[in-house]
Image (cartoon, helix red, strand yellow):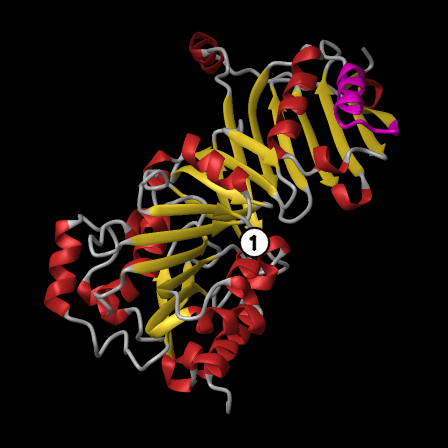
Amino acid sequence: MNSLGRHILVEFYGCSTEVLNDVPRIESSMLEAAKEAGATIISSVFHHFSPFGVSGVVVIQESHLAIHTWPEYRYAAVDLFTCGYSVNPWVSYEILKNAFEAEHGSAIELNRGQLELLERSEIDLGELRDEATQKLVTPRYSRSVWFTDRNENIALSIRHKGDRVFREKSPYQTVEIFDTFEYGKMLTVDNMVMCSENDEKAYHEMIIHVPMLVQPAIKDVLVIGGGDGGSVREILKHPGVESITMVEIDEVVVRASREFLPSLSSGLDDPKLKLIIGDGIEFVNQAASGSYDLIVVDSSDPVGPSEGLFSKSFYTDVHRCLRPDGLMTAQSESPRFNQRAFVDLNHCLKDIFGEDQVQCYLAFIPTYPTGMWSFSFCSKNGVHPVQDLERDRAAKFAEANGLQYYNADMHQAAFCLPTFIRTMLNRTA
């Protein structure tokens, strides 16, 4: 041994794009690479960067293994550093090359801390050495794996337990469920957070009870999207509802939610529900005029299969399908995170329903980037979400059903918009 450590700088080319964007799989491969090389693992920390890329490090008693991936280039840069010669980093190299399905790799080894260039100093620790020796324990492995939802300027990271609960690539999107430390099980679609067990009430209670407590005569409801079941669960708390039709394009979302998110999906087998696996855009285009008292657009962000749910033609059909006193609510993105989509959708709805028939309101959802999320309340015939609210009825309903976010005060306050949002939505500004 003529150096303090071995440092291998690695580049892998032609890797699997899917593997390089998969945090749990990369973490598992890096841990295996460290273990098989003879290292003692201390901790691991891994982050995903939406839509592409993973960064992470496995800290070992002998130093570290680090990685950053560029899936769009099928490229990964890996840093293998081991102190001494008890760990063979070249074993790690071969394992990772196979794990990433690399077409080829290159590496250069550096000797770090060459002994002929160093002068050893004698350090007398005295009693401290004896005391430290007595306290030596086997390092305890800690794991820190993070899911990150981000755009080019803003990111939100949520720590989860590392191994996915569910993952399936449908014809439309990649559906995953992670078990997080803070929010319970969390559903994601194409690396974007859809909902989590511990904070979904804000979203589902506000998108459903705001319209339904303003218009108590609602009997027939159409839900577009909402495959996790949370919106249906809340609708079923209103006994006057006679029928619910839910049109969800991806059966994988429904199946995953049924199995792993029972607190959300409990209403999906209710006899009042007609569940259709199909295209919501096509469904409303073919639906009869004046069919529904309430339409809820519970969609994901305006990308992939949900992109068409943010179009003028879709909402024109929604307006046609409502009865004369019908209402519509839709999730309308974050005023901070998806500003353009938020503004464009608001203007689109006002063009269709009328300037005074569309009201924006807010809820605060920690697992969504920026925490601030918006909904749009649309009335076909002048129902106002605040002026027409029976506060006593709303308060009794919230208490009787044990609602966690919605109450009569929150209903009213949600429509009090910050000045910057009012300015953003003012077409003459």
Q: Residue furthest front?
A: 288
Question: Mark 1 is on which residue type?
Answer: Asp
Magenta highlight on residue 105: yes
397 horizontally vs 92: left or right = left
- Look at the picture and state if 286 lies above or below 170: below
Residue located 11% across and 58% down the image: 396
- Look at the picture and state if 210 lies above or below 203: below
Quarter of the figure that contains the N terminus: top right
In the image shown, does 10 or 354 lie closer to the viewer?
354
Numbered range of the magenta stretch: 89-107
Which percent across, then down, holds residue 168? Answer: 59, 34
Residue located 61% across and 25% down the image: 59
In the image shown, does 253 or 291 lie closer to the viewer?
291
381 horizontally vs 289: left or right = left
Which percent across, then down, holds residue 291? Answer: 39, 65
Q: Residue furthest bottom?
A: 428
Which percent across, then down, holds residue 329? Answer: 39, 66
Magenta highlight on residue 170: no
Residue located 56% across and 61% down the image: 281
Label tally = 1
Q: Secondary structure at mark 1?
A: loop
Residue tagged 1: 279
Which percent across, then down, holds residue 370? Answer: 46, 59
